[in-house]
Amino acid sequence: MGIVKIDDHLHDDIRRASTVMCRSINAQAEFWMKIGMLAEANPTLSFNDITKMQLEAADVHPKDLVAA
């Protein structure tokens, strides 16, 4: 683990997003970094595709989360 310098404006964006997404500031920053890394590695995938892929890798299936 280390320290990462983040621009003040980006930190404010992370702080606001973390509130909406019910994550800590660090967890929100980590989420954005992970999604960004996966997007760069898989440029043809959409955000939804990447999210679905990550949920399936964690054995969480979105269709099972929807109330019938």
Image: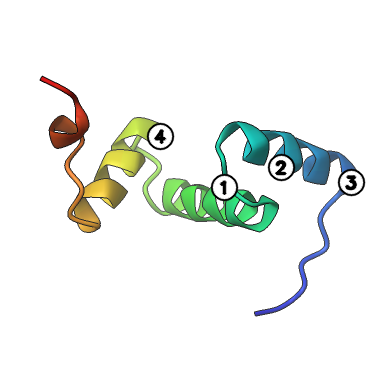
Residue 54 in picture, x, y percent from top left: 30, 50
Label 4 close to label 2 by CB (< 8 Å) = no
Q: Residue at x 14, y 31 (%)?
A: 63
Q: Few, some or many C-alpha atoms within 10 Å of disc 3 (few <14, some 14-19, many ≥20)?
A: few
The CA distance from mark 1 to mark 2 is 9 Å
Whether tag 1 and tag 2 are in contact, CB under 8 A, the answer is yes
The answer to whether residue 42 is above or below residue 45 is below
Q: Which of marks 3 and 1 is nearer the N terminus?
A: 3
Q: Quadrant of the C terminus?
A: top left
Residue at the spot of label 4: 47
Q: Which of marks 1 and 4 is nearer the N terminus?
A: 1
Residue at mark 3? 8
Q: Which residue is drawn at 34% across and 32% down?
A: 48
Label 1 SS: helix
- Mark 2 closeness class: few <14, some 14–19, many ≥20 residues within 10 Å: many
Going by the numbered disc 1, the residue's amino acid type is: Trp
Residue type, mark 2 in image:
Ile
Earlier sequence position, callout 3 versus callout 2: 3
Whether residue 24 sits left or right of residue 38 in the image: it is right
Which residue is denoted by mark 1 in the rendering?
A: 32
* Image mark for residue 52: none
Residue drawn where x is 27% and y is 48% of the image: 55
**Which is more N-terminal, label 4 or label 3?**
3
- Residue 58 occupies quadrant: bottom left
User: In the image, what residue type sits under mark 4?
Assistant: Phe
| Residue that mark 2 sits on | 14
Q: How far apart are marks 3 and 2 (CA)?
A: 10 Å
Q: In which quarter of the image is residue 41?
A: bottom left
Query: Foreground: 34 or 58?
Result: 58
Q: In the image, 33: left or right of 19?
A: left
The crowd level at tag 4 (other Cα within 10 Å; few <14, some 14-19, many 20+) is few
